[in-house]
């Protein structure tokens, strides 16, 4: 969902991992009615990436909205998003620099998951507002056939358990229903998923702890407010699981599973004065609200990753005075969540970590997708720094 737009825009656009945060003057009407989700909008026209023969690859950051990031190791990571030209070039970290890698078409990529150097998945939506799935085989990205969703649909997130067990989630805009797809090693198939009664439901994040335990989170419209939606895979079926009640509603954007008895979900808690960070934890029996440090203004959390029961990261953004955005990073130490200084102005939509000294967060500096500048931040064990395309610490893009 586009970062920090008006309520009408919230209902028309979704920047994966980011539920737009409304200013206090408009938040009262946000998240109450209307269909969120990307299908129905007109994505930028697809076009080729032009590069002179023998020239160095262009920087992947300027004019490129980064929606999601996934890391395999300190020397291997992928980030995906959308460029100004409507191309969906993923970008790859090889331990030295970030470089664009061509994909097979236009549209927008919202989620990415990595199994190995020769096996990665990216999901989103295509030029005709259809669900889009791309696969990396170690040499190239290619589109993979998707099952019918009955009309326009968007995939917000993907999680991989093994080469023969991958999940993708999102929503079918025309029907207002949740969408869950599963890869069995040969083909993708739609799997039945609960859709609560209401005008619109969708899933924004997915995480899998094993073949018999996976989580999907999002939101549903109860006709009076938007409330978090949580679903669980038990190895046989997806079932809705109760989420803690919120007085004014809220939305879950991301989920991470450290084990079958420890999972985190993050998003936005709607309040009378704007929105606040929302954090929920699964302890193996139930989901419960967990205190999040107060942000400096209206804001929320868009993405989460968990290394273990005592180590997790959550990212998002907040408004400062004069409607300036500031990225937010929070860290779980096994006891509490604490804010950690984040250098970039803007909004972080996704975070991934492979160790206590290696984490990446990506997002957007600027007010509109495709018109801003992509953010890449790296955690080295002691601080977050912005990275340039050269792979070296560089100046952060301005918000």
Image (spheres, helix red, strand yellow):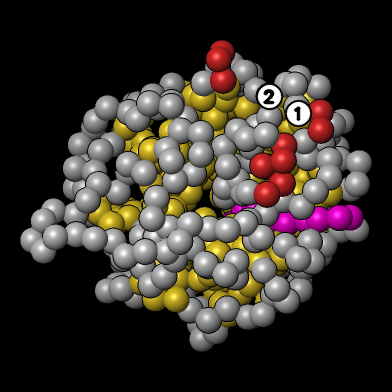
Real-space Cα separation, disc 2 to disc 1, in angstroms: 6 Å
Whether residue 199 appears in magenta in the rendering, the answer is: yes
The stretch in magenta equals 198-208
Q: Are marks 2 and 1 in contact (CB under 8 Å)?
A: yes
Q: Secondary structure at mark 2?
A: loop
Please say whether residue 307 is visible from this viewpoint.
no
Find residue 74 and report its horizontal and vertical position in percent.
29, 48
Q: Residue at x 22, y 51 (%)?
A: 58
**Nearest to the observer: residue 331 or residue 64:** 64
Q: Secondary structure at mark 1?
A: helix
Q: Residue at x 63, y 72 (%)?
A: 181
Find residue 299 and report its horizontal and vertical position in percent.
62, 27
Find disc 1 in the rendering and name its residue: 27
**Nearest to the observer: residue 213 or residue 339:** 339
Majority secondary structure of magenta residues: strand
How many numbered discs, if any? 2
Q: Quick one: quadrant of the C terminus?
A: top left
**Nearest to the observer: residue 308 or residue 265:** 265
Going by the image, does 109 lie left or right of 57? right
In the image, residue 267 sits, relative to residue 215, either above or below, namely above
Whether residue 343 appears in magenta in the rendering, the answer is: no
10 Å neighbourhood of mark 1: few (<14), some, or many (≥20)?
many
In the image, residue 189 sits, relative to residue 335, either above or below, namely below
Q: Which mark is residue 23?
A: 2
Kindly give the residue lying farthest to the left in the view shown: 54
Q: Quick one: quadrant of the N terminus?
A: top right
């Amino acid at each position: 969902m586009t970062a920090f737009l008006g309520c009408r825009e919230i209902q028309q656009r979704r920047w994966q991992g980011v539920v737009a945060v409304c200013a206090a003057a408009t938040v009262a009407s946000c998240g109450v009615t209307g269909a969120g989700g990307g299908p129905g909008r007109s994505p930028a026209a697809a076009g080729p990436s032009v590069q002179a023969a023998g020239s160095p690859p262009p920087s992947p950051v300027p004019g490129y909205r980064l929606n999601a990031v996934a890391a395999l190791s300190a020397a291997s990571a992928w980030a995906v998003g959308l460029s100004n030209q409507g191309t969906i070039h993923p970008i790859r970290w090889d331990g030295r620099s970030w470089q664009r890698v061509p994909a097979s078409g236009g549209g927008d990529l919202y989620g990415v998951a990595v199994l190995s150097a020769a096996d990665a998945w990216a999901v989103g939506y295509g030029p005709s507002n259809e669900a889009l799935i791309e696969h990396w085989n170690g040499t190239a990205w290619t589109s993979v056939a998707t099952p019918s969703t009955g009309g326009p649909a968007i995939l917000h997130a993907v999680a991989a358990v093994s080469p023969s067990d991958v999940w993708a989630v999102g929503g079918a805009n025309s029907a207002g229903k949740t969408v869950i797809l599963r890869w069995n090693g040969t083909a993708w198939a739609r799997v039945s998923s609960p859709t609560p009664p209401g005008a619109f439901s969708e899933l924004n994040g997915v995480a899998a702890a094993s073949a018999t335990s996976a989580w999907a989170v999002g939101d549903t419209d109860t006709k009076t407010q938007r409330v978090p939606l949580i679903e669980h895979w038990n190895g046989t079926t997806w079932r809705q699981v109760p989420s803690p009640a919120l007085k004014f509603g809220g939305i879950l954007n991301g989920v991470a599973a450290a084990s079958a008895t420890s999972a985190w979900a993050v998003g936005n808690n709607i309040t009378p004065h704007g929105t606040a960070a929302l954090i929920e934890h699964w302890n193996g029996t139930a989901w419960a609200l967990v205190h999040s440090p107060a942000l400096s203004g209206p804001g929320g959390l868009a993405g989460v990753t968990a290394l273990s029961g005592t180590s997790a990261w959550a990212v998002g953004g907040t408004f400062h005075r004069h409607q300036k955005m500031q990225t937010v990073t929070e860290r779980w130490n096994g006891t509490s969540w604490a804010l950690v200084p984040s250098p970039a102005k803007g909004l972080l939509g996704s975070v991934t970590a492979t160790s206590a000294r290696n984490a990446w967060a990506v997002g957007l500096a600027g007010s509109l997708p495709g018109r801003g500048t992509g953010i890449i931040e790296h955690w080295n064990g002691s601080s977050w720094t912005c990275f340039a395309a050269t792979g070296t610490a560089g100046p952060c893009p301005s918000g």
